[in-house]
Amino acid sequence: MAYEDYISELEEADFPSPAAIEAGADALTFVVSLNNELRQNGAKLPEDPDVDKLGTVLDGVFAELAAASIFLSEKSFTRVPKMLRGIADAFEKADEDFKDPTGATGPSVPSAIVRGYRHFATRIEAARVQKAELFASLKKFEDSQETS
């Protein structure tokens, strides 16, 4: 069953199915976890999740990421994606060579952060391509206006 069907069932049925209840609980758990994670990283959010405020914070995070990607896609930063991938590789290599004197195990840098470096490199490259395509289409439009 699709989530839209579960939502309708939860809103309209007197006795929703266990599957719909479980899907609703999963969604609520996700919202609470996301709210807590963002708060731990400095977001000004209430302790009890407010979906509207959470959405505003997520919009801001994506806007910051897009702005950084567009900025770093400039020609003067051509080597940035390669550098980011190099940092990710260095973190992975350091983990292979890392011997913790306390006997602790696990990566010194969380794998999500290592993947984040690689994803950000890809996003920068995509922004560069998208920007070039946008400029090319604007140039075509401009040229067509001059000839008409």
Image: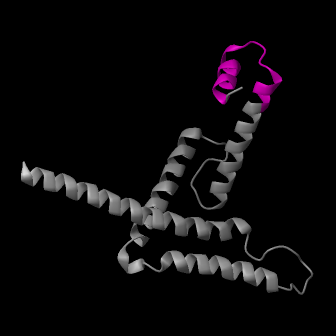
Compared to residue 50, the image places residue 113 above or below, namely below
Q: Looking at the picture, tell me which residue is in the foreground, 18 or 97.
A: 97
In the rendered structure, the answer to whether residue 53 lies left or right of residue 28 reads left
Residue drawn 8% across the image and 54% down it = 146
Figure quadrant of residue 9: top right
Please count the marks in the image. Answer: 0
Compared to residue 121, the image places residue 78 above or below, namely below
Q: Residue furthest top?
A: 14
Q: Looking at the picture, tell me which residue is in the foreground, 25 or 126.
A: 126
Image spot of residue 59 (x, y percent): 49, 50
Compared to residue 95, the image places residue 63 above or below, namely above
Figure quadrant of residue 109: bottom right
Compared to residue 7, the image places residue 138 above or below, namely below
Quadrant where the N terminus is found in the figure: top right
In the rendered structure, the answer to whether residue 144 lies left or right of residue 14 reads left
Image spot of residue 43 (x, y percent): 58, 56
Q: Coloring scheme of the render?
A: one colour
Q: Main secondary structure of the magenta part?
A: helix
Residue drawn 66% across the image and 67% down it = 115
In the rendered structure, the answer to whether residue 76 lies left or right of residue 104 reads left
Figure quadrant of residue 17: top right
Instruction: Check if residue 10 falls in the magenta segment.
Output: yes
Residue drawn 75% across the image and 25% down it = 20
The span picked out in magenta is 3-22
Image spot of residue 38 (x, y percent): 63, 55
In the rendered structure, the answer to whether residue 79 lies left or right of residue 86 reads left
Image spot of residue 39 (x, y percent): 64, 55
